[in-house]
Amino acid sequence: MTNVGRAALARALQGPGVLAAAGFAVNGGNLLANLVFARALDAANYGALVVQTGIFLILSMGGSALQIAVVQRDTSAPGHTRHQRGFWIRRLRGVCAVGVAVAGVLGLLAARPAATVLSYPHPLAIAEAVVAAGVWVSLSVERGLLQARRSYQDLARNFVLEGAARIAVTIGLMFAGLGVNGAGLGLIVGIALATEHARRRSARTSRKVADIRCAATCDERIGSTGPILLPPVSTVRTRHALRRDTTTALAALVPLAMLQNMDVVIVGWLNPGSVGPYAAIATACKVPVFIGLAVANFLLPEAARRRQQGRPATAALLAAVGWVIAPGLLLVAVGAVAARLLLSEVFGPELTAGAPALWVLALAMTCLAVTLLFTNYLLGAGRRGVVGVLAAGTVLTGGGLIMAGGDLVATATMALVCQAVTVSLAGLMVVRAHSPAVLAMAAGTPPGQAAGPAARAQPCLLY
């Protein structure tokens, strides 16, 4: 194996590994924090805190979609100088700063009417959730830049910083007597600190003109001195490209969020008395999904970068899938032999009724985690058809869960069947994306020339 091959393999293993560890640490911290909040607050205030978090998660989806668009745009590296490449980033940062101010004003104006409609006793908490979602957009831009520049260790540190700061400030303010409003302030402070950290790290990232579009190709192809031929730079305007990619990413994120959470909602609708035990197993089974969300930050830019070269990011995809399948299968094994003990120790003996369904739902969520990775891979490869697959999978899953009638084992089994169908369809799209004709088209070169010098290529000199 060549030095380049070893370096590529090491990057494929280290990138998702460090992000998976960070995701596991942050979500473990969130779980412990929720246990603290549940004991520090009464039932009404804890419910209000959950509602505030839900409002933020809904509003933050736009920022998460923009993050995907930033990765795709920065990886394509429009322009030929560092100034040209940085121009659109500076403009986008300015728009985000204005957006935070607008979100603050709109949040304050809409807080009381929204609280009245929702019968929510904390109007200021709604305003805080809106502001936090506005700041999240800025954080998403900076994280997208770190992704595109392969700063995976900095990105992992940023995850941990945001989670630690948010949890520490929230707990401090809540015990200081601010309650739910303190939790909203903690959310804003944590995101703001993470935004500044990510901005500083992205500013320190080396951005030579050849780094993004040429590094991998030059490493692998160079055998003598001279210029390296690369596909032409895209002429699509940045504003239009960001709008298009953000819309596509949002169209993918919405069904993914529904696939992750609709089973609890449907069980609560059809079988309210069993929603508590089912929510317990659903929470336990989200581990592979949470890890998948972190690992996707590695897979998306790797797929987008390989797309520019007309090659598949197979090694990156396999490494990422391995990082979600391993804990998923471990959870399946634990659920098969010690589900009741696990639920009793973590959630209490009163929430163990769903123990027989734990291993089934764990397998279903592992399938969903792989679907999540396939989706990011396909978006990075420019295959927008995955949105249709996710939409169809969402409809299929919704109908199947309703047919299960709220029974815990039947619901988990139906979820597994539907998630297996969805991941299979997404997997077929991945296989299709690896065909030579599709790879050549993605790189902007005629079929048969994707792996070699393109006739319309532009020179790129190594420094």
Image (cartoon, rainbow, N blue to C red):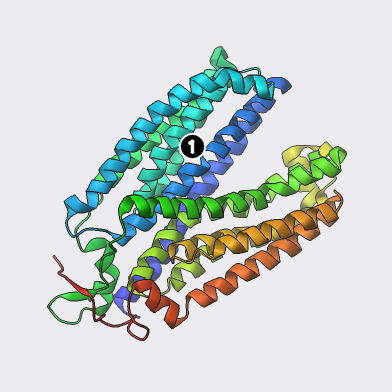
Q: Determine the residue positioned at 78% across, 51% down.
A: 339
Q: Amino acid at mark 1?
A: Gly
Q: Give the labeled residue for mark 1.
A: 163
Q: Residue at point 73% right, 57% down?
A: 397
The x, y position of residue 136, in whole percent, is: 44, 37
Instruction: Name the spot of residue 82 as percent of width and height, x first.
Output: 18, 53
In the picture provided, is 357 more to the left or to the right than 151?
Answer: right
Residue 36 shows in the view = no
Name above or below for residue 444 compared with residue 353. below
In screen coordinates, is 204 left or right of 116?
left
Mark 1 surroundings within 10 Å by alpha-carbon count, few (fewer than 14), some (14 through 19), many (20 or more): many
As displayed, is residue 100 above or below residue 410?
Answer: above
Residue 181: quarter of image: top right
What residue sits 69% from the left and 51% below the top?
A: 285
Work out whether 140 lies above or below 338.
above
Label 1: which secondary element? helix
Q: Position of residue 126 (x, y in %)?
A: 56, 24
The quadrant of the rendering that contains the C terminus is: bottom left
Residue 303: where, in percent of width, then height?
42, 65
Position of the N terminus, as image quadrant, is: bottom left
Answer yes or no: is residue 10 visible: yes
